[in-house]
Structures are given as C-alpha cells and as structure tokens.
Image (cartoon, helix red, strand yellow):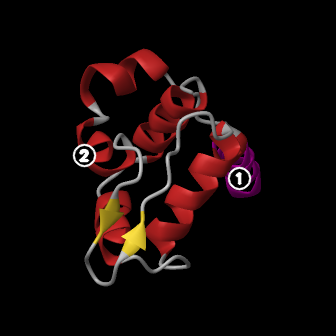
Amino acid sequence: MKKLLALLVLAGTANYAAAEVVGNAKAAADNKIAQCVGCHGIAGYKSVFPEVYSVPMIGGQSAKYIESALNAYKKGDRTHPSMRGIAMSLSDQDIADLAAYYSQKK
C-alpha cells in the first residue's frame, strides 16, 4: 500500500512539474506592465545604474525569449541589479503573462 501511494504521489508530482504556465496578455496589460514601461517603453532609453546601459525595446521579442531572460535574472544568471530585483518579485504566472503581452507588441 505504501509503495502504491508513493507511486501515485510521484506520478502526480511529475504531471504537475510538466504543466506549462500559459501567459495571459490581458492580465499583464491590466496590472503587470507598470514596472516595465518606465524603461522598456521609451525608445533609446539608457539607464545609469549600475552603469550606462542601453535598455532594449522588448516588444515583439518571442515569448520564450522573454520568459528565459526573466528567469535568468531571477536565478542570478543575468546580473543587472534592477532587472534581478524586479524578476525576483515575479511569479511564474507573472513572467508568462508579461512574455505573452510583450511578444504581441511591436
């Protein structure tokens, strides 16, 4: 009985881990883009912390690229301090929603 229960738990965990979070562009537009538009919504914008850095326009990037970049900031693989702080505050759903929103923009 214990083995069967353990297998069921393991199978349920595997299915949960494999579930992909689906982004909702409208949810991002309604309440999640405020942190982004101040820098990424201004053509030619340059940040000055921690150094002068040309901020990329992210509209039109693929959703997978945006998700990958935000997750890399969240894990510390990308090191821009402002982006890391923002990414660490985002849930997987937030990241998927933002990626869906910006992938549809030009």
Give the amino acid type for the residue marked by disc 2 in the picture. Answer: Gly
Q: Position of residue 3 (x, y in %)?
A: 75, 57
The residue that disc 1 covers is: 10
Q: CA distance from mark 1 to mark 2?
A: 44 Å
51 vs 65: above or below = below
Residue placed most toward the observer, 35 or 106: 106
Which residue does the image show at 37% across and 27% down from the upper left?
28
Main SS of the magenta part reads helix
The residue that disc 2 covers is: 38
Which residue does the image show at 75% across and 45% down from the upper left?
11
34 vs 45: above or below = above
Q: SS of the residue at dot 2?
A: helix
Q: Which stretch is magenta?
A: 1-16
Q: Which image quadrant for residue 93?
A: top left
Q: SS of the residue at dot 1?
A: helix
24 vs 51: above or below = above
